[in-house]
Structures are given as structure tokens and as C-alpha cells.
Image: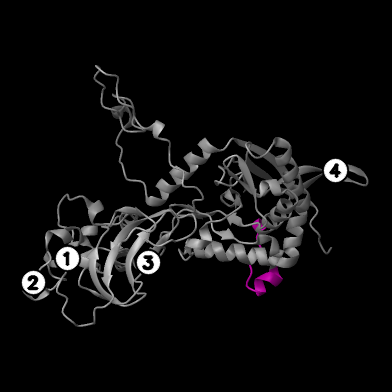
């Protein structure tokens, strides 16, 4: 299992594209792996013949674990006397070709039979999730993987043939900064000696007798992404001393400046959003308040020289946080271009593993969906996360030379969750005041 980013500690085999006896070219994809970060193809380190698969699909192993053996001294077309999984160790000349052999060691790579078999043995979570979303019976999909295994592209092709439009979106996974796992103390404890404990109800199950009141229900397994979000968010709530500070910001000058620059930037292929202004103001404030551009490591605070800005991107089935590195070097236009780039590639599933780790501060933007107030959960091991809410026109009191007046201005709330282990309320308030002041005094030409 190769290293796929500094913070990736393990990976799960989704599918083998080659099996024992197959010839492999160097850098040819041999298997698909999913991590808490992203889905990746694992290329062969050298040309040769596949000798043995050591880790079956569905198995999670640590980085550095051997996945398979390749005979790098073999030659294309020559006989391979020992195919471990395909013929039980007998010479190849005395056994059927490895692609048609159905020996027990390869049972998990055979086509799924009709009936109520455990589909998790044959279909990856990505395949099952796409199929469930579109109501596809996977028994009707012809697989092109080893042994007839149904791959993601097979399901998408089937959907395109049935509906005329492919699902078309790969399934990237959540950015996770911490290897946190729920405490073992949360696991059910054995009953006291001499007593007989009643079977524990599943987590979240209604009390006995309530089912008939609830009505019909259905259960489905969480996607890999949903499980990763659950672990990370629960871990963050248990780890950090969460507090939230909120300020109201007037976007009148930002809106005016955006109107001045938008058309020119659009001609250069850059979409200038309000988020770009907030990101630029945040980076400037972080440079003046470095305590918020830090992380907690045991009893120490680690201050980061660079602002590696995480931008939360909503997906159909979760979210991912690509990181804009050295964001302090970017102008407003550069920031807008960088945000558009990582967001588009995140939604298309084209991020590299290294692009979803190493953030030092995160911005999330639920305001684009109409949210007006929220308390986000900190992205560990960072110490704060800023939430941009919907920008709404409201009547406000405006101070002028002739006194106060009522005007209609675009207003929003900036909500920041922060870790009281690393910060105090004054730190959070001063930081948000700096962001607010920058946004409300943005230079305009007229």
C-alpha cells in the first residue's frame, strides 16, 4: 500500500484489475484503492507477471503493507509454472488458463450469482451507491472487471444506456486531517458477573414497541465518505473545546468592487465570487493574528508560516476540503481563480491526494444554499473554521454627514467556531473584527 499523502495511514482495496498469471506493464493500474481522502488507482511498480494477490477486495490495510507479488524477471509469453491462486500451485501446462479457472481461492473475483448473496463481496461501495441512487439492479449490469466484476464505469455506462445521460461524477472522499477514532470507551461493556444482559439494540434504533408508530422504514449502509465524515466530526467535537463567535458584515463596498471587476475577470476566464473576497480578507487577518493559523499538538501550539487555506466543497454525498497552498501569495484575482479551480476539480473527482491535506485554516460557504446562521465543526487539527452565510439585503442604519439614515445594504453573518484550548474569546473577536473591517472598507474606484 503506497503512501498517498502525508496524513493517509491506510487504504481499502476496492477491486483488482489483474489476477495471478496476468502480464503487467510498468505503471499500468493493477488495483483500485479508496482512502479517507480520495479514490486512487495503484500502478504496477515494474513490468512482470502477477504471481499472487495478498490482500482481497474490501480489506483495509496500513500504508506499507504488501498487496501483491509480481515476478519482474518473467518474460511476456513465457510459461509461468506457478500460479498460486489460479491453479493451486500446479504447473500451468497441467491446468486451465488462469482467466477461466474457478478455483476456490479466486471465489471472490467470480461473477456474482443470482440470489441473495452478500453483495458487499462483489460490489464496491461506490458501485452500490451509484446503483442505489439510480435504482439500478446490479444483476442486470454486465461487468468488465476480473471474473465479471461490475466496476463503476460499467454502472455509469448502463445508466447512460437506460436514461441517455451518465451519472458521470466520480466519488472523491473526505479530507481528514486527524487519525482520530471514537474512544473504545464508547463500545458496549460486558454485563456484571452473574447477570444476564439483554441484547443491545442497534445504535439509533427506536425503543421496543415504537416501530409500529414510526411506520415503514429502510436501512442502507453509510458510504465510505459518510463514515469518514462521521468519524472526523465526532472526533473533533470530543477533542476541541468548541466555541462560536459571530459578527455581522456589510458587503456594500465588496458588492461595488465586485461589480467593477467582474466583467473584466470573466473575459480572462475567472469567476469573481463573494467567497474570494472573504478568503482574501481572511488570509490578511491570519497574517496579523497567527494564533488562528496554528494547530494543536499535545500540549503545544504549532504556528504555520504559510496560510494553507482549505475551501469546503459540497458534493452530492458529502463534502471534501481541497487546500490552496501559500494563499498569502495570491491576489484577489488569483484567489478567485484558485477557488474555482479546486472546486471544479473536487466535484469532478480529479483532485490529487496531496491536494486534500495540510490545511491550516478552513472556510465553508453554506450561505450559497441560503443558510443564514451556523456553527461549523472545526477541521482537526486546525484551531478555527470560518463560515460565510447568505448575503441578504436588509435595512440598516447608516451614519452620514447629515446624521443617521436608513439604507438597504447587502448584509451577512461571519460565524467562526474556534478551539478554546488554543484561543480565548478576545483572540476570536479581534480576528473577526479584522476580517469585517477589511470587507467593509474595500477600495472602490467610484
Residue ID at (73%, 53%):
287
Q: Split into 4 quadrants, where in the image is the C terminus? A: bottom right
Q: Which residue is mark 2?
A: 95
Kindly indicate whether the residue at mark 1 contacts the one at mark 4 (C-beta within 8 angstroms).
no
- Foreground mark, 3 or 2? 2
Give how far across and how far down residue 136 sits, in percent: 28, 57
Q: Residues within 10 Å of mark 1 (few under 14, many from 20)?
A: some
Q: Which residue is mark 3?
A: 41
Classify 43 as above or below 298: below
Q: CA distance from mark 4 to mark 2?
A: 91 Å
- Foreground mark, 4 or 3? 3
Residue ID at (63%, 41%):
418
Q: Tag 1 or tag 3, which sits nearer the N-term?
A: 3
Q: CA distance from mark 4 to mark 3?
A: 61 Å
Q: Is residue 331 left or right of residue 354?
A: right
Kindly indicate whether the residue at mark 1 contacts the one at mark 3 (C-beta within 8 angstroms).
no
Q: Which residue is mark 4?
A: 405
Q: Residue furthest front?
A: 73
Q: Tag 1 or tag 4, which sits nearer the N-term?
A: 1
Residue sitting nearer the eye, 11 or 397? 11
Residue sitting nearer the eye, 210 or 336? 336
Image quadrant where residue 374 sits: top right
Q: Residue furthest left?
A: 94
Give how far across and how far down residue 439 sits, in percent: 75, 53
Q: Is residue 317 visible?
A: yes
Q: Which mark is residue 174?
A: none
- Magenta stretch: give its range: 263-275
Q: Residue furthest top?
A: 194
Residue ID at (8%, 71%):
95
Q: Which residue is mark 1?
A: 84
Amino acid at each position: 500500500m503506497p503512501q498517498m499523502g502525508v496524513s493517509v495511514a491506510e487504504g481499502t482495496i476496492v477491486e483488482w484489475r489483474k489476477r495471478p498469471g496476468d502480464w503487467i506493464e510498468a505503471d499500468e493500474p493493477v488495483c483500485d484503492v479508496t482512502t479517507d481522502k480520495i479514490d486512487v488507482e495503484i500502478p504496477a511498480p515494474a513490468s512482470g507477471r502477477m504471481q499472487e494477490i495478498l490482500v482481497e477486495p474490501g480489506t483495509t490495510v496500513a500504508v506499507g503493507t504488501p498487496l501483491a507479488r509480481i515476478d519482474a524477471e518473467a518474460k511476456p509469453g513465457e510459461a509461468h509454472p506457478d500460479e498460486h491462486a489460479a491453479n493451486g500451485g500446479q504447473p500451468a501446462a497441467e491446468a486451465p488458463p488462469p482467466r477461466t479457472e474457478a478455483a476456490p481461492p479466486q471465489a471472490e473475483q467470480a461473477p456474482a450469482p443470482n440470489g441473495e448473496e452478500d453483495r458487499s463481496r462483489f460490489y464496491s461501495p461506490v458501485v452500490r451507491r451509484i446503483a442505489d441512487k439510480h435504482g439500478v439492479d446490479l444483476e442486470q449490469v454486465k461487468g468488465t472487471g476480473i471474473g465479471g466484476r461490475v466496476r463503476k464505469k460499467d454502472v455509469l455506462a448502463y445508466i447512460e444506456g437506460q436514461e441517455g445521460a451518465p451519472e458521470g461524477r466520480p466519488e472523491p472522499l473526505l479530507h481528514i486531517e486527524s487519525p482520530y477514532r471514537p474512544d473504545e470507551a464508547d463500545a458496549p461493556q460486558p454485563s456484571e458477573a452473574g447477570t444476564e444482559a439483554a441484547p443491545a439494540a442497534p445504535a439509533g434504533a427506536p425503543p421496543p414497541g415504537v416501530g409500529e408508530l414510526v411506520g415503514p422504514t429502510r436501512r442502507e449502509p453509510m458510504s465510505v465518505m459518510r463514515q469518514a465524515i462521521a468519524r472526523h466530526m465526532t472526533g473533533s467535537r470530543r477533542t476541541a473545546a468548541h466555541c462560536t463567535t459571530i459578527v455581522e458584515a456589510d458587503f456594500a463596498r465588496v458588492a461595488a468592487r465586485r461589480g467593477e471587476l467582474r466583467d473584466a475577470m470573466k473575459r480572462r476566464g475567472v469567476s469573481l465570487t463573494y467567497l474570494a473576497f472573504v478568503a482574501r480578507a481572511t488570509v490578511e487577518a491570519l497574517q496579523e493574528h497567527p494564533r488562528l493559523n496554528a494547530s494543536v499538538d499535545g500540549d503545544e501550539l504549532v504556528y504555520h508560516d504559510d496560510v494553507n487555506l482549505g475551501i469546503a466543497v459540497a458534493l452530492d454525498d458529502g463534502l471534501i476540503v481541497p487546500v490552496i497552498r501559500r494563499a498569502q501569495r495570491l491576489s484577489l484575482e488569483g484567489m478567485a481563480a484558485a477557488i474555482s479551480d479546486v472546486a471544479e476539480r473536487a466535484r469532478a473527482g480529479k483532485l490529487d491526494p496531496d491536494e486534500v491535506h495540510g490545511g491550516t485554516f478552513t472556510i465553508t460557504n453554506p450561505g450559497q444554499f441560503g443558510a443564514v446562521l451556523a456553527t461549523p465543526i472545526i477541521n482537526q487539527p486546525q484551531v478555527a473554521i470560518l463560515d460565510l452565510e447568505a448575503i441578504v439585503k436588509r435595512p440598516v442604519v447608516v451614519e452620514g454627514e447629515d446624521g443617521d439614515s436608513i439604507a438597504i445594504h447587502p448584509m451577512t453573518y461571519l460565524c467562526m467556531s474556534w478551539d478554546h484550548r488554543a484561543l480565548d474569546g478576545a483572540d476570536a473577536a479581534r480576528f473577526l473584527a479584522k476580517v469585517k473591517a477589511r470587507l467593509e472598507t474595500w477600495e472602490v474606484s467610484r
